[in-house]
Amino acid sequence: MDQKLGNHLLILDKIVELQNSISQSQQVSLVQQIFLNGFEGQEALLELLVKRRNIQQLPFNSLDGILFERLYNSELNSIQQSLKSYFPNGLIQFNSHCNVDYKRLQTLLIQKQYQKADSLTQLSLCKLVGLGNNSNRNWLYFTDISLIPSSDLKTIDLLWRLYSMEKFGFSIQRQIWLANNCDWEKLWTRIGWKRDGIACRYPSEFIWSINAPKGHLPLFNQLRGVQVLSSLFNHTFWNE
């Protein structure tokens, strides 16, 4: 068999395997194997992403984030240009009631700059509830939470989930909280906000990488009590 044809068939086989894979670790491995086949492999990954997002319009899952991140870091100019033409604003069509631009947050998350992404998330939340640059505070009261539009909360959460392989995000934290019977102390321990019963100090004792415990990011200041996070976990968005 011609080597070029054989390589093409191998890529197609791996694309099929990738589409049928449900394991995130397997998805990452397969995407990398296909990616290393140069232009042909990367083009196949791009075609799969376009098919999922623009044609089939499937519900978002971790595979979309894995595909986009890998292609975003391609060194091939043609792939970069094609990716931008299909997804000029990234994977998500941003919808903000308060005209918050989430492109910067998306870029930081793709680049795994989690500490900067966390800070920007907090600033965005403050802006969403009407706390501008001239405000005397840059944190939220529990009474502010109901002012966060559901569409913006959805966008922020989806960005964190997409670019962390479903490891980070408010919904992930909420799932862990519910799974532990809404026990706050268990939550702090599970997501790594407390160690040996002692609250972590910001920022040095938090883990700013994908190796952090599930639900570790984004942060909320639990030292001010649980009312703010409780209000977030009970936001009407989760019941919509």
Image: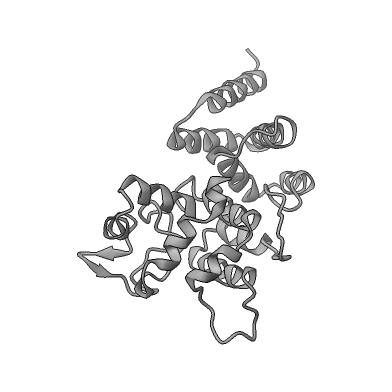
- Tell me the quadrant of the picture where the C terminus can be found: top right
Number of numbered callouts drawn: 0
Rendered position, 34 above or below 120: above
Colouring mode (rainbow / by chain / secondary structure / one colour) = one colour
Residue most extreme to the top: 1
Q: Where on the picture, by quarter, is residue 208?
A: bottom left
Is residue 206 found left or right of 22 in the rendered image? left
Q: Position of residue 160 (x, y in %)?
A: 53, 54
Rendered position, 55 above or below 109: above
Along the viewing direction, whichever of 156 and 107 lies nearer the viewer = 156
Residue 169 visible from this viewpoint: no
Along the viewing direction, whichever of 160 and 141 lies nearer the viewer = 141
- In percent of the image, x 60 and y 63: which residue is there? 148
- In percent of the image, x 61 and y 36: which residue is there? 59
- In percent of the image, x 52 and y 70: which residue is there? 143
Is residue 199 found left or right of 17 in the rendered image? left
Rendered position, 24 above or below 139: above
Residue 179 visible from this viewpoint: yes
Q: Position of residue 25 (x, y in %)?
A: 43, 37
Along the viewing direction, whichever of 141 and 134 lies nearer the viewer = 141
Rendered position, 96 above or below 60: below
- In percent of the image, x 56 and y 39: which residue is there? 61
Q: Position of residue 54 (x, y in %)?
A: 74, 36
- Tell me the quadrant of the picture where the N terminus can be found: top right
Is residue 201 found left or right of 233 in the rendered image? left
Q: Position of residue 68 (x, y in %)?
A: 62, 45
